[in-house]
Amino acid sequence: MNTAVDVLLTQFPSMNITATNGDYGTMDTSTDGDVDIVTDLPPLHLSVSVYWLVFYIFVYGIIIFGSIIGNQLVIWSYIIEPKLRRPTNTFIVSLAVADFITGLIGIPTAIFGRLFTGPYVCFAGTRPFLYVMAFIMCSVSIDHLVLITIDRYIAVTRPLKYPTIMTTRKCRIFTAFVWIFGSFFGILPLISPPANPTLWVCGLANYEGSTVSIHRIGSVASIPVILFFLCLVYIRIYIVVMKHVREQSERIKAHTKKDDESSAKSAMIRTTVTTSIVLGAFAICWLPTTLKFLVEVYVTTTEENLFTIQTIAEILSFGNSMALLSACSLRVSESSSQLWLVYTLHLTVTMSVGMSTRSATKESATMIGSNAELQSIIESCIERVLDRKLDSFLKKVEENTRKIREVEQIIDSQSTKMKDLQTKIDFLQNACNRMVKENNDLEQYSRRNCLRIFGIPETENESTDDEVIKFAKSRLDVQIDPSEIDRSHRIGKPGSPIPRHIIVKFLSYSVRQRVIKNRRRLKGTGIVVKEDLTKYNQSSSRSKETC
């Protein structure tokens, strides 16, 4: 038994393998139910001719070199240049990282699986590991392509709201989602392990596990869907850009020379060509890959023809990317030198797509984002929107000014009325004060013959007239005839612990004055005689006493 078979028996002891003599041996398969069992195993050997090997080394050497060096420059430029650390450039740097990993790991391992045949390389249990990194990075890269396209769409159609829509936090969240989703889709072939890990799947033998089938179907179906989506988005971008170019051209016609008008027309032509390049490059890059997947599954052909179809599909996409790189480099020559360098390097990044091939759309999208022409169009769009907003604002200001003037006139009119009313109020207030004073004087005059006597003990069934006469005679030595008293009574609720005071009204003012003159004799007796004052005079008297 040869060395390769010994290794396989050590790793897979349950495998049914029989050895044959010869340098490479022969490989036959027998059917045990639905599972193929390897009965004769060739050692690891080169599966292509020397010419194909030289061709692969030359083409993919350029691709790998450009991918690694170009993406390193993009990442390094982003790190050392603070001006490039904008939120949307997060997508470019993330894409550069994915392409760098593709060129460093994904493409070499995938090429190894394509050029060599032998143990482990052709086993259903181990072969997917050669392509999983390329699958993951290509899926992540395609998702970045869609994300960058959406970003460009928002930048062109909503230039004023763009900074608030694509914030740094949102860009990082979108980038993380792209990596998670792309990684999950890329590892689908590894999720469902084969029933027989040693099943031979090289050449025309294709292992169709459940998740492998899902991954293949998803890859085939997603390409037309993404192409249709990009067509819609770029058609919309094209319409918006052309609209702005026409408006700019109309302004040029009204204010500038014909040379400027011709430059506007040339800008329209360049925009049309750019959009055509974007959509055409994506179709050329991806549709052959879709055809390759369909041929692998549904078309019966020889191993040599299948290998040729796979190679042509890959070379077409890579060659298109390289051709588009040159075209885009020429088309962005009007940009600033720094942005031209960074974004041209980003176009070089796209050569690292791996075996599934990257669309040139992202190069064109990046080219559009860095093109001075698009920047001028966006500035024109912003200027137009600002002019419209400014006109609307000025109209509102003028309208508000008119309303303010009307309100001022109303206020002036009302102010005059208020002054008149205030004059009337002052007059009425003075009249009211006079009336209050006169009323108080009249009320006080009506009380001119009244006195209030505090401290006279209260007895049951008493006569207040008698109490007053008795009090005046005993305490004040004043003789009062009962006929000189008009009336008297106590004030307050009966039964209170303190004797209620007596209010008495004399028939003549002279009797009242005799009592007032002799009230000094009441000092220290606990009895007090006071004038009967109105409430207003009482409050005035208290204020004077307080002062």
Image: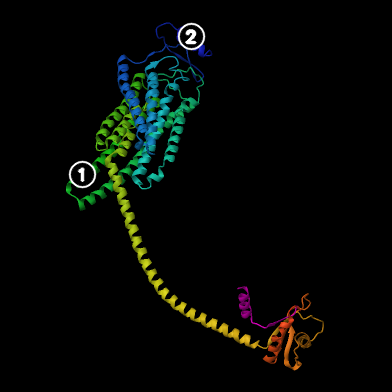
Taking the magenta stretch, the answer to whether it contains residue 203 is: no
Secondary structure, mark 1, is helix
Seen from the viewer's position, the closer of residues 39 and 471 is: 471
| Image position of 405 with respect to 472: above or below | above
Secondary structure, mark 2, is helix
Name the amino acid, label 1: Ser
Name the amino acid, label 2: Asp
Taking the magenta stretch, the answer to whether it contains residue 540 is: yes
| Image position of 527 with respect to 338: above or below | below
In percent of width and height, residue 46 lies at: 37, 14
What residue sits right under mark 1 in the picture?
263
In percent of width and height, residue 109 lies at: 40, 21
In percent of width and height, residue 172 lies at: 43, 37
Callout 1: few (<14), some (14-19), or many (20+) C-alpha neighbours within 10 Å? few
| Image position of 88 with respect to 478: above or below | above
Residue 6 marker: 2
The mark closer to the camera, 2 or 1, is: 1
Residue 534 position by quadrant: bottom right
Which residues lie in the magenta part?
526-547
Q: How many numbered discs? A: 2
| Image position of 414 with respect to 439: above or below | above
Seen from the viewer's position, the closer of residues 545 and 120 is: 545
- Left/right placement of residue 100 relative to residue 499 reads left
